Image: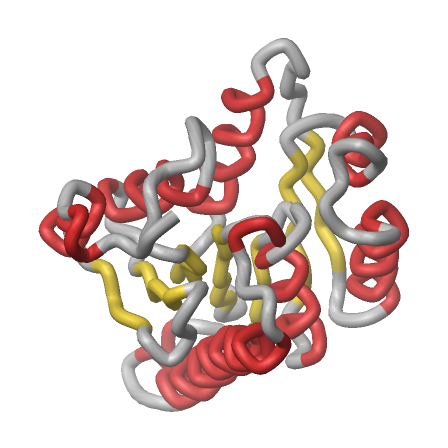
Amino acid sequence: MAQVVFRIGVVGHRPNRLPKDEPTMQALRDMIRAVLEDAKVAVLAATNEAPVATLYSEEPPAFRAISPLAEGIDRIFAKEALSLGYELCCPMPFSQQEFESDFLAPAALEADSLTHFREILKQAQIGPGLVTFELDGDRSNPEIAYGAAGRIVLNQSDLLILVWDGGRPGGVGGTVQTMQEAIRHHVPVVWIDALVPDAWQILRDESDLDCLSSGETMHAQ
């Protein structure tokens, strides 16, 4: 009999579109952690109930976090998930060697970004577990490569955490496009407002995305 596996993916902003004050950043981390914790509790409860309990093995459920480990939300999510015992699945848009150039000057937005990236991979490898996917993206079409990695996140996720400031799309293959694809493919989405983390909502269908075309509901950029 198969083991129960529950997977949570993430899509969200890089540091330049995240709050600059520590209290709001801590609230953001706390909210991400709360979703991860609540998901574990719900899945554990469900697997002990009939008829689910009769369909799977008696092994404890496995929990996996799906994150490409880009700077910003991807890493915040991964660190919280690892601390809760989630395994890490890391799809990369390029080979790891090529992807790591994103975390070097002048592209990097975080101090010691490459070291941070490698430390999270190592933490997962020696801890709960690590799987990596190195896609064959081409630097001549980076948006296509990042979009492909985003689709891997969606394909591997039973639930998606979206950290979005409510603003306009930053480009092809980014946070908003991945969110829209998640809705179209019926992946449940928990939207956490990047600027007001206590303001969250479930996105179920296209009608929940009216804020994309309504200037009144969008945060100022």
> Is residue 209 something one can see in this rendering?
yes
User: What's the residue at 25%, 67% (across, down)?
Assistant: 202
Task: Give whichever of 178, 103 is nearer the camera.
Answer: 103
Q: Position of residue 69 (x, y in %)?
A: 67, 50
Q: Residue furthest top?
A: 140
User: In the image, 209: left or right of 169?
Assistant: left
User: What's the residue at 44%, 64% (across, down)?
Assistant: 194
Task: Give whichever of 37, 176 is nearer the camera.
Answer: 176
Q: Position of residue 134 (x, y in %)?
A: 70, 32
Q: Where is residue 55 in the image (x, y as percent from the top left)?
A: 38, 73
Task: Give whichever of 196, 63 is nearer the camera.
Answer: 196
Residue 22, by quadrant, is bottom right
- Establish if 100 lies above or below 206: above
> Is residue 40 something one can see in this rendering?
no
Task: Give whichever of 76, 182 is nearer the camera.
Answer: 76
Q: How many marks?
A: 0
User: In the image, 145: left or right of 172?
Assistant: right
Q: Where is residue 186 in the image (x, y as percent from the top left)?
A: 24, 50
- Establish if 156 lies above or below 27: above
